[in-house]
Image: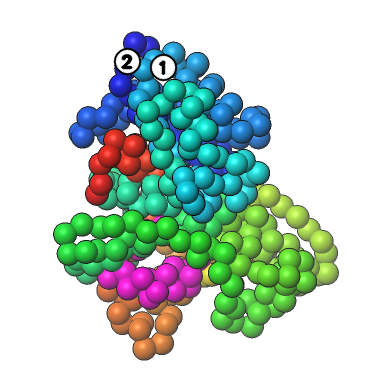
Amino acid sequence: MPETGLVIAGDIGGTKSLLGAFTPARAAHVPVCEARYDNGKYAGIEEVLSAFIKDNALKGVSAACLALACPIEDNRGTLTNRNWRVDAETLAERFGFARVSLINDLVATAIGSLYLQPGDVHVLQQGRSRPGNRALIAAGTGLGEAALFWDGHAHIPSASEGGHADFAARTDIEMELLARLTGRYGHVSYERVLSGAGLEAVYSFLAYRHDGSDQALTASVIVDEALNKGSVLCSEALDLFVSVYGAEAGNLALKTMAAGGIYIGGGIAPKILKALQNGGFIKAFRDKGRFAGWLSEIPVSVIMNEKTALLGAARHAAGIKG
């Protein structure tokens, strides 16, 4: 591939890496090339980048922006759910890039959300369109959260590690779940419930509660069985997961005053869209006492485009702000 002056964008999570090469032109939404890599097959991000550059014969790449599922400080970060240390300066020297920027993956998703088309989202609650802050919550390998603060002219993305805040049980069964998870982990964050591993933990808890058994199923099996009505226990697990998801999305809306809307991102939401539409999510989202009416006016949408973070990273790499 003879293209030069490209920017590499990456969405680097605990499970997979999605990489794309983009032209730096302002209107460029579509990558020149892209590829997905299973992180379990690589020792670090350097190997993934090397494979991407080699596989696509990329020459003259000028810049890169990697969106990482972890906090970023001083252009460095260590993936929360995979022990990869990433240093922008080291990557620039290794690959000869003029500049490398590291940003939080939810910040990248936030930037990308500003460029989504109507077909890229599914509306759960129409709400009322108005200017104001927006926020994102995204369950996948972990749980990410971010805000888009409105300054009167543009949305400014802000990172958050809200997914690691204390899980707040609201019902008797959630209190039982919290007690069981506390015995296992000590500190129980929302990520312990709202993630792939979290859904598995919810199912295991319900199985133990049902008959004292120590059953274990993968998240994908739980979702398939629940959506196809093959297992009552799987359906109960997914319903509880969805309710907690809606409650935390409502918490995030309140904390950020997200009158402009809430986006549901991550890899899980599109797979469980049918369950999200059943009413449990929005019911829990609105269930905030005196603020129930205010929350009912907030637009809530599921991001269906899995490349939103990649688009946001590409925009950032090209120096384009939303």
Magenta residue span: 245-266
Query: Nearest the camera: 277 or 286?
Result: 286
206 w.r.t. 34: above or below: below
Judge whether residue 138 is colored magenta.
no
Pick the residue in front: 140 or 207. 140
Q: Amino acid at mark 1?
A: Leu
Residue 173 placement (x, y as % from top left): 65, 78
User: Can residue 301 be seen here?
Assistant: no
Residue 246 drawn in magenta? yes
Residue lying at the far left of the rendered structure: 153
As displayed, is residue 187 above or below residue 40? Answer: below
In percent of the image, x 41 and y 87: which residue is there?
289
Which residue carries the number 1 mark?
Answer: 58
Vertical relation: 4 (above or below) 261: above
Q: Residue at x 37, y 40 (%)?
A: 313
Residue at 69% in and 61% down? 201
Q: Which mark is residue 3?
A: 2
**Pointer 2 with pointer 1, Cβ within 8 A:** yes
Check disc 1: other Cα within 10 Å, few if <14, some if 14-19, many if 20+.
Answer: some
**Type of amino acid under label 2:** Glu
Q: Quadrant of the N terminus?
A: top left
The answer to which of marks 2 and 1 sits earlier in the sequence is 2
Real-space CA distance between mark 2 and mark 1, rounded to the nearest whole angstrom: 7 Å
